[in-house]
Amino acid sequence: MGIDLYKPKVLKLSLEGFDGPIDLLLSLVKDQKIDITKIQILPLAEQYLIFLKKVVKEDIELAAEYLVMGAILTYIKSKLLLPIEEDEIDNPEKLSQILKFQILKLETFQKLAKNLFLRRRLGKDFFSKGVDEIFSKKVKFKYDINLYDLTKVYSNILLKDEKEVITIAYSNLYTVEKAIENIKKNLTKIQKWKNIMSLIPNDIKNYLELKSVIASYFVASLELSKDGKIFIKQNNDDKNFNLQIIKNN
Amino acid sequence: MENKNTINDDLKKKIIEAFIFASKKPVHISLLQDFENDKNNLENLIKELQEKYINSGIHLIKIDQSFVFRTSDEVSGLLNIEQELTKPLSRAASEILAIIAYHQPVTRSQIENIRGVTLSKGTIDLLFEVGWVKPGKRLKTPGRPLTWITTTSFLDHFGLSSLTDLPGLEELKLSGLLSHENILFSDPTNDEE
Amino acid sequence: MENKNTINDDLKKKIIEAFIFASKKPVHISLLQDFENDKNNLENLIKELQEKYINSGIHLIKIDQSFVFRTSDEVSGLLNIEQELTKPLSRAASEILAIIAYHQPVTRSQIENIRGVTLSKGTIDLLFEVGWVKPGKRLKTPGRPLTWITTTSFLDHFGLSSLTDLPGLEELKLSGLLSHENILFSDPTNDEE
């Protein structure tokens, strides 16, 4: 496990300000104040990957898009560093060109959006007539419903119709029972004091799961010591919360 | 108005004109003094504006101490053709219209099944009168019930070039219209949009 | 209009003036044809009306195929009024609006490809609700995906008389940036043309 649980969270990075990986790349380019048409992919890829690594540690809810982009950039980076083979299918140059194109395109639309809202706007910079006027005695009512209203109404009917189903999303947390079972299984192997961390499974996929494993192992060890199955000790001199257990013979 | 003294009468007149135009209610003369505090001159400017509109389809008229633009009598008589006024469609009628749009051809009792309530008389009639729905073919089931379908004028009103341009179920879901936001716990490893 | 042939141009002009003036929203030219069915003459009359208002606080402006009175630029800043304005849009929503405006007709997944990120639910929906975008024709590609286009009310809101007035549109076309090709995230199963 490369994740250091005990390190204080000094570095706080968030992807909240970014609207997708291309937006992130674009702001990395802007930070450097380089001409957007002269982007160097290699350094940009490196920065992105460094950034991503930091964020992955902090923010496990990272959207898949960022990881996909990370993979693409890693690929481009490795290809650019190696001599180019003939007949390369995914030519790294081509990929970088496309990437640059997309960054440029997003930048263009961001600018256009900004300029659009800088324009004179109805109700703020120029005005409509204050009221609709009725001039005729013969009035035909036109019903004021637009496509949005129609689809909204229809959606509501469908929603009302659907049985309210509450979905509890699957969560990949580690149970105390499982931890107890695992420690018991390992007890025969334990001859001397052992760090509890050395007992946890090594196929944990993410930070949240790791946290739940540690919590469950901690509770499990208390449970087992209460039952007289194991002893626990904590080394006070150690800054880390270093819980050790030994079999009670 | 900071620099009203540097603004000439011509511009003041335009400002007063636009202000009365954009107001929701007849504009009391005291409000116009913000643009011209010399009351005599203000009255002059308004008089000039009224004269400007004398030969128009609209007149600047004085009601009590307030001013408002109104269609001239000359024209409003001729405009006494049917004027379209908008008013909201009732919820029941919108629902029925939506069901006919999405489920057509659909019978009255099918509509009732979908909505789970009996149709009050006149709701389909109203939609028929407006011209958005019309009777379609009868079903070949017992009782040969009448079906309802939408009209060309329905498409026109909603700016659709054909019925297939109605947003479909998938699209309603994606647009967020069709979703229960009832997920209690979300799995952080799941990359839901 | 029964006796429209006996009505002279001067009176027709007044009627058209009053009719457009009465409405807060742009009036489509097809509605004005009720008063003058000779399209050339209708356009002439409207042009004369526009000229009449050139030196006024309000202007008769053309938006796409519609006409509406709006306060003139000269005085708008001096009026000190605020009409109801829609809530400010999020950065994502305004970007999506720009993409739809410059790229239209454009499908949801084309927008996603350009931005390199999945659209969160409800973003297009919001623009739809405000009335700035509406569904356009479906593409004739597999899946017949729905496209999105902008509305007259979008043009009106941003003071544009037509889509070709969008600033930078020509340059954008020439730059090749409007191509849907060369997209990194393009998903072969989706609606690329």
Image (spheres, coloured by chain):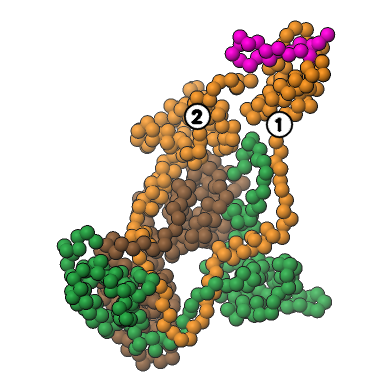
Chain colours: A orange, B green, C brown
Q: Nearer the viewer, residue A124 or B46?
A: B46
Check residue A17 in the rendering and tell me which mark sits there, or answer none: none
Type of amino acid at the residue the image marks with label 1:
Leu
Does residue A248 belong to the magenta stretch? yes
Give coordinates of residue B62: x percent, y percent. Answer: 30, 81
Q: Which residue is mark 2?
A: A12
- Quarter of image, res B193: top right
Q: Is residue C157 left or right of residue B56?
A: right
Q: Amino acid at mark 2?
A: Lys
Left or right: B142, with B136 as reference point = right
- Quarter of the picture containing the N terminus of chain A is top right
Name the residue beneath numbered marker 1.
A173
Q: Are marks 1 and 2 on the same chain?
A: yes
Residue range corresponding to the magenta coloring: A229-249
Label 2 is found on which chain of the structure? A
C39 vs C115: above or below: below
